[in-house]
Image (cartoon, rainbow, N blue to C red):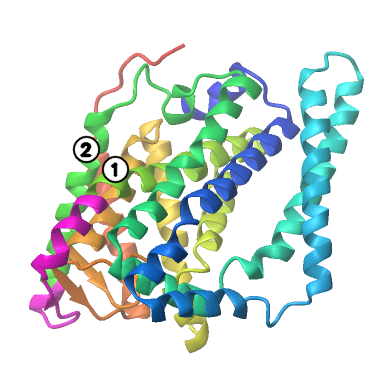
Amino acid sequence: MQYFRNTRLHGVSNWWSWIFVFWLTLLGWILAQLFLTSPLLPIAQEIDPELGQAFLEASATAFDDVNMAVIGLAALGFLVTTAFGLIFSLIALTTKNNSSKGFGIAGGIAIAGSFLCLFLLSPLASSPESTDVLNRLLALSPLSYALILLTFPASLVMLYIGQKFIHKRTILSLHTAFSKFRFARAFQAIVVTWVVLGVLAFGLNAFGITPLTFTFDATRFFVYAAISLAFIPLQSATEEIVFRGYLNQAVENLTRNKWVAFILTSLLFMAMHLANPEALSGAEAGILPIVMSSYFFFGFAACLLVWMDDGLESAIGVHAANNTFAAVFVNYENSVLPTPSIFQIQASPGLDSVFTILTLAIILIALYALRPKPVVRAA
C-alpha cells in the first residue's frame, strides 16, 4: 500500500531517525503534560479545599513505595542520556560522511538509556490514588477536563517538526497517501460508528443485557458535551497519528511486514492505557488481560482501517466517534472520561470485550462497503 511505501520512496528512513523522532514526540508529550496540567492543583484547591488536599496527598503517596536513591539516579540519568541522545542524533542526521553511522548508534544507545530512565520514573507519574483524585477533579471542573484533552494534540508539534526536518517528508504523508486529507471519509466513519454504537447500546438495553440508566443533568451536560465534541476528536486524532500513523510506518519500514507493525503498535497502544481507571480496577479484580484486550482489538481494527483506506481518515473518525459517544451519550462508572453523559451503563469486562469485537467487525464491514473508489494519489 502506498501509505507505507512512501516512507521508502521519499525522505530519510535510517533506523535511528525513526527512534529519534519518536523520542522527540515522547519528550514533547511530557513537556505538554507538565505545562498544561500545572494549573490542576490550584483549580482543585479553588473548587474544594479538601479535594486540593487529597490531590497533594495522592501526589505524595507516589513517593511512598519507591526507592528514592533509584529515583534520583534515574532522574539524573534521564537528563544526561537525553542531552547525549539529542547531540549524537543531530550529528548523525546532519553529517554526510562515514562517521554518521557511529554517531547514530551512539545516539540510539543514549536514547535507549533515556527510555529506561523514564520507565524507572514512571511510578511517580500515576498511582491508583492520583488517578482517583484526578477523575474526581475532571468530573467537577470542565476547565481541567479540557486541559487534559489538550495535552494530546500539543505533543504533535515535535512529531511534525521531526517529520518535516528529520525525515524530510511532508506532514500530509503522515496522515494519508492521497493528495489531500479526506475529511468526508473521516466524517462518514464518525456517522457509521455512532449509528452502530447507538443501535447496539439500545438493542442490548431492550434485551436487558446491559441496561441503560438515564442520568442526564442539564446543569453539567452541555458544557462537557461541547468540550468533548470540540477536543476529543483532537485527542483521538493524535493517538491515531502517533500509533496507526508514525509508529506503523516506522515498524513496517524497518521490518517490511505490516502484520508485525500492526501487532506491535496495537500492543503498545494497549500498554499506554494501563493507567486508566478501568485497568486499575481490572488488575485489582484479577481480570486485567480481559479488560485490556479491548484496547488491543481496537488498535488492531484501526490498523486494518489504515490498510484498507491507505490513510488515517477512517481510523481517526472511528476513534473520535467511539470516544465522543462514550463521553456524551453512553458512559459507564469509573470511566477515564468522567463526563455527565445522557445515559450510563454498568461495565462488564467479559461482555464488553465480546461486544467490542462485534462492534468493530460491523464497523469494518460497513466502512469497507462504503469505501470510496480509488483516485489518483500524490506522488
Left or right, 79 with reference to 193: right
Coordinates of residue 39 in the picture (x, y in percent): 45, 57
Q: Nearer the viewer, residue 62 or 287?
A: 62
Residue 172: image quadrant is top left
Kind of element beneath mark 1? helix
Left or right, 205 with reference to 379: left
Q: Magenta stretch: give its range.
A: 204-228
In the image, which disc is placed on residue 317? 1
Left or right, 323 with reference to 205: right
Coordinates of residue 266 in the picture (x, y in percent): 51, 54
Q: Amino acid at mark 2?
A: Phe
Left or right, 59 with reference to 226: right
Position of residue 262 relative to residue 323, above or below, is above
Residue 214 belongs to the span the image colors magenta: yes
Coordinates of residue 273 in the picture (x, y in percent): 49, 63
Q: Nearer the viewer, residue 95 or 291?
A: 95
Q: Amino acid at mark 1?
A: Gly
Look at the image and tell me whether residue 181 can be seen: yes
Coordinates of residue 114 in the picture (x, y in percent): 76, 50
Residue 229 belongs to the span the image colors magenta: no
Q: Nearer the viewer, residue 2 or 165?
A: 165
Labels 1 & 2 near each other (Cβ < 8 A): yes
Q: Nearer the viewer, residue 209 or 329?
A: 329
Kind of element beneath mark 2? helix
The residue depicted at 75 percent of the width and 34 percent of the height is 16
Dot 2 alpha-carbon crowd within 10 angstroms: few under 14, some 14 to 19, many 20 or more? some
Residue on which disc 2 sits: 187
The residue depicted at 43 percent of the width and 64 percent of the height is 42
